[in-house]
Image (spheres, rainbow, N blue to C red):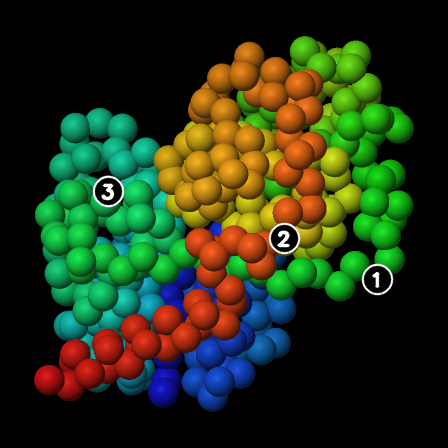
């Protein structure tokens, strides 16, 4: 079976990581997997380019990239096309059905975070979201979301039944091969020699709200606490300025992007997720797999589902500085250390995730062949 995975790029992000994991597993099971990217950049691109056929549109504008995609799909046939991230989940299904060679290709679209929280900031933008999801999701054979709460949002937004949106949570990642004690190997990444090492992993953007962590460190800077933020993004300059203005460089470090974030999480005493909204954050799964205790904002969507209403980690209100600082200092999070993910039946092992996706691929082929 020949599959195409269409994404904006292969920058480091939850969606891109999961799609790359999916591609590798499907290739191992005999599928012919191809990537179609709007842009040929991203931290994951080099590794993916060694393993897969990648077609990069590299157009100067979004509109011209859509025309380039139409031209490519007229010349190349795929059995099933996987489309991730709005607004591609609107435009691409239309283009696929217009391209003569792929009119009978299966189409699976997926969303990985709240569209309303990310894009629906005005009445006009909400109306655009409603119209585009209404059209795009109906053209697609299947719609997937990463959590039950996100499914509810998408079904209401696109005015489709909940049964048409399949919940396919991100799978548990493999435990990394540490090759020694991760704490000893990576403890030098944190500034100073603190009693408590905190780590946050994620893109530096407003959604992830790392500013909340810096506000917390301003209060905790004399408590023998150190923070390491792993990731990069558009908020970096703003966060660097805040570090200087608040004299936090001796207890906070912005590390940038690395390819071994799981090992760094394992070296920390505590993982903190500060996001304003999510979909089904992979970093929480990574922290659970390596056994690092978690404090997470109780944001829409994902943390409450992953942590089972607080059974496997501490949940705090979103953007609440007082609650976050209190939760760090009272150290109740220590009781969640080294939780065994094998005892968490609500989380999806990788093999089960691939089985479910294979079933969806088969149903998509059957549907277009009716």
**Mark 2 Cα-neighbour bin, 10 Å: few <14, some 14–19, many ≥20:** few
Residue at figure coordinates x 55%, y 31% from the top left: 314
Q: Which residue is mark 2?
A: 340
Label 1–label 2 contact, CB within 8 A: no
**Mark 3 Cα-neighbour bin, 10 Å: few <14, some 14–19, many ≥20:** some
Name the spot of residue 284 as percent of width and height, x first: 55, 45
Label 3–label 1 contact, CB within 8 A: no
Q: Which residue is mark 1?
A: 179
Q: Is 222 drawn above or below residue 133 in the view shown?
A: above
Residue at figure coordinates x 64%, y 31% from the top left: 333
Mark nearest the camera among 1 and 2 is 2
Q: Is 185 drawn above or below residue 213 in the view shown?
A: below
Q: Which residue is mark 3?
A: 153
Q: Is residue 7 left or right of residue 40?
A: left
| SS class, disc 2 | loop
Q: Quadrant of residue 329?
A: top right
Residue at figure coordinates x 16%, y 80% from the top left: 368
State which quarter of the image contains the N terminus: bottom left
């Amino acid at each position: 079976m020949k599959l195409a995975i269409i994404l904006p790029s292969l920058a480091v992000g939850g969606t891109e990581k999961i799609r790359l994991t999916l591609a590798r597993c499907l290739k191992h099971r005999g599928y012919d997997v191809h990537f179609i990217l709007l842009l040929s950049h991203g931290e994951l691109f080099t590794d993916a380019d060694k393993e897969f056929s990648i077609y990069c549109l590299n157009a100067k504008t979004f509109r011209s990239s859509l025309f380039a995609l139409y031209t490519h799909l007229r010349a190349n046939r795929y059995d099933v096309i996987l489309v991730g991230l709005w607004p591609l989940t609107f435009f691409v299904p239309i283009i696929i059905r217009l391209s003569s060679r792929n009119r009978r290709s299966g189409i699976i679209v997926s969303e990985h975070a709240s569209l309303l929280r990310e894009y629906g900031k005005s009445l006009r933008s909400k109306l655009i979201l409603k119209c585009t999801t209404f059209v795009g999701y109906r053209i697609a054979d299947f719609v997937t979301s990463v959590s039950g709460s996100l499914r509810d949002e998408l079904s209401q937004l696109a005015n489709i039944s909940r049964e048409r949106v399949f919940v396919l949570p991100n799978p548990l990642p493999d435990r990394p091969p540490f090759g020694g004690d991760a704490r000893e190997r990576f403890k030098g990444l944190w500034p100073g020699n603190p009693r408590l090492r905190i780590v946050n992993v994620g893109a530096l953007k407003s959604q992830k709200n790392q500013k909340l962590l810096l506000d917390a460190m301003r209060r905790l800077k004399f408590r023998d606490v150190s923070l390491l933020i792993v990731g990069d993004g558009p908020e970096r300059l703003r966060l660097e300025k805040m570090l200087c203005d608040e004299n936090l460089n001796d207890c906070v470090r912005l590390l940038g992007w690395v390819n071994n974030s799981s090992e760094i999480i394992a070296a920390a005493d505590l993982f903190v997720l500060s996001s304003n909204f999510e979909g089904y954050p992979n970093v929480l799964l990574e922290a659970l797999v390596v056994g690092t205790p978690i404090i997470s904002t109780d944001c829409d969507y994902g943390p409450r589902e992953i942590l089972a209403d607080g059974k496997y980690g501490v949940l705090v209100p979103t953007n609440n500085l007082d609650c976050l600082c209190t939760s760090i200092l009272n150290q109740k999070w220590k009781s969640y250390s080294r939780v065994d993910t094998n005892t968490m039946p609500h989380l999806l092992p990788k093999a089960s995730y691939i089985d479910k996706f294979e079933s969806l691929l088969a149903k998509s082929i059957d549907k277009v062949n009716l």
